[in-house]
Amino acid sequence: MSASQPLPRKPTCARCRKHPVIAEYRPFCSKRCADADLGSWLNGAYAISGAPAEDADDTPDRPAQTHGDDG
Ligand SMILES: [Zn+2]
Protein backbone atom coordinates (compact mmCIF):
# COMPACT_ATOMS: atom_id res chain seq x y z
CA MET A 1 0.00 0.00 0.00
CA SER A 2 1.30 3.33 -0.87
CA ALA A 3 0.49 6.47 0.98
CA SER A 4 -1.99 8.51 -0.87
CA GLN A 5 0.04 11.26 -2.30
CA PRO A 6 -1.61 14.58 -2.93
CA LEU A 7 -2.81 14.95 -6.43
CA PRO A 8 -1.23 17.73 -8.39
CA ARG A 9 -3.85 20.37 -8.23
CA LYS A 10 -4.63 21.80 -11.56
CA PRO A 11 -4.34 25.54 -11.61
CA THR A 12 -7.71 27.13 -11.73
CA CYS A 13 -8.81 30.35 -13.26
CA ALA A 14 -7.46 33.34 -11.40
CA ARG A 15 -10.81 35.00 -11.68
CA CYS A 16 -13.62 32.52 -11.30
CA ARG A 17 -11.46 29.84 -9.69
CA LYS A 18 -13.76 27.20 -11.03
CA HIS A 19 -12.47 26.20 -14.37
CA PRO A 20 -9.01 24.93 -15.22
CA VAL A 21 -6.61 27.40 -16.70
CA ILE A 22 -6.28 27.44 -20.44
CA ALA A 23 -2.74 28.02 -21.56
CA GLU A 24 -3.88 30.49 -24.16
CA TYR A 25 -5.59 32.65 -21.60
CA ARG A 26 -3.40 31.89 -18.64
CA PRO A 27 -3.93 32.48 -15.83
CA PHE A 28 -7.56 32.46 -16.78
CA CYS A 29 -9.89 29.79 -18.01
CA SER A 30 -11.22 31.69 -20.94
CA LYS A 31 -11.08 34.92 -22.85
CA ARG A 32 -14.18 35.92 -21.01
CA CYS A 33 -12.52 35.77 -17.64
CA ALA A 34 -9.34 37.31 -19.01
CA ASP A 35 -11.25 40.23 -20.46
CA ALA A 36 -13.34 40.61 -17.35
CA ASP A 37 -10.29 40.72 -15.16
CA LEU A 38 -8.52 43.12 -17.44
CA GLY A 39 -11.59 45.28 -17.52
CA SER A 40 -11.87 45.44 -13.76
CA TRP A 41 -8.17 46.15 -13.54
CA LEU A 42 -8.46 49.01 -15.97
CA ASN A 43 -11.45 50.36 -14.12
CA GLY A 44 -9.46 50.24 -10.92
CA ALA A 45 -6.55 51.99 -12.56
CA TYR A 46 -8.83 54.65 -13.88
CA ALA A 47 -10.41 55.14 -10.50
CA ILE A 48 -7.04 55.38 -8.82
CA SER A 49 -5.05 57.45 -11.28
CA GLY A 50 -8.02 59.53 -12.26
CA ALA A 51 -8.32 62.56 -10.07
CA PRO A 52 -11.84 63.60 -9.10
CA ALA A 53 -12.67 65.07 -12.44
CA GLU A 54 -15.46 67.52 -12.00
CA ASP A 55 -14.86 69.31 -15.25
CA ALA A 56 -16.43 66.71 -17.48
CA ASP A 57 -17.91 69.51 -19.45
CA ASP A 58 -15.67 69.90 -22.47
CA THR A 59 -14.84 66.24 -22.77
CA PRO A 60 -15.34 65.23 -26.37
CA ASP A 61 -17.39 62.15 -26.87
CA ARG A 62 -14.93 60.07 -28.79
CA PRO A 63 -16.11 56.86 -30.35
CA ALA A 64 -14.63 53.55 -29.33
CA GLN A 65 -11.79 52.56 -31.53
CA THR A 66 -11.89 49.09 -32.92
CA HIS A 67 -8.73 47.57 -34.16
CA GLY A 68 -10.36 44.50 -35.53
CA ASP A 69 -7.64 42.53 -33.88
CA ASP A 70 -9.91 40.52 -31.72
CA GLY A 71 -9.65 37.50 -33.93
ZN1 LIG B 1 -12.60 31.72 -15.27
Image (tube, helix red, strand yellow):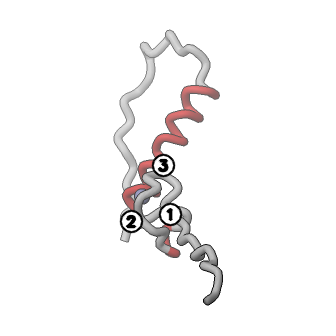
Q: Looking at the image, do the residues carrying marks 2 and 1 touch, with CB atoms under 8 Å apart? A: no
Gap between marks 2 and 1 measured at Cα: 24 Å
> Which residue extends farthest top?
54
Image: 3 above or below 33: below
Q: Nearer the viewer, residue 7 or 13?
A: 7
Q: Nearer the viewer, residue 27 or 18?
A: 18
| Residue assigned mark 2 | 70
Q: Where does ligand 1 appear, by image quarter?
A: bottom left
Q: Quadrant of residue 41?
A: top right
Within 10 Å of the Cα at label 3, are there few (<14), some (14-19), or many (20+) other Cα atoms?
some
Q: Looking at the image, do the residues carrying marks 3 and 1 touch, with CB atoms under 8 Å apart? A: no
Q: Looking at the image, do the residues carrying marks 3 and 2 touch, with CB atoms under 8 Å apart? A: no
Q: x, y percentage for residue 47?
A: 55, 26
Within 10 Å of the Cα at label 1, are there few (<14), some (14-19), or many (20+) other Cα atoms?
some
Q: x, y percentage for residue 63?
A: 35, 40
Circle 2: residue type:
Asp
Of helix, strand and loop, which one carries label 1?
Answer: loop
| Residue assigned mark 3 | 37
| Residue assigned mark 1 | 12
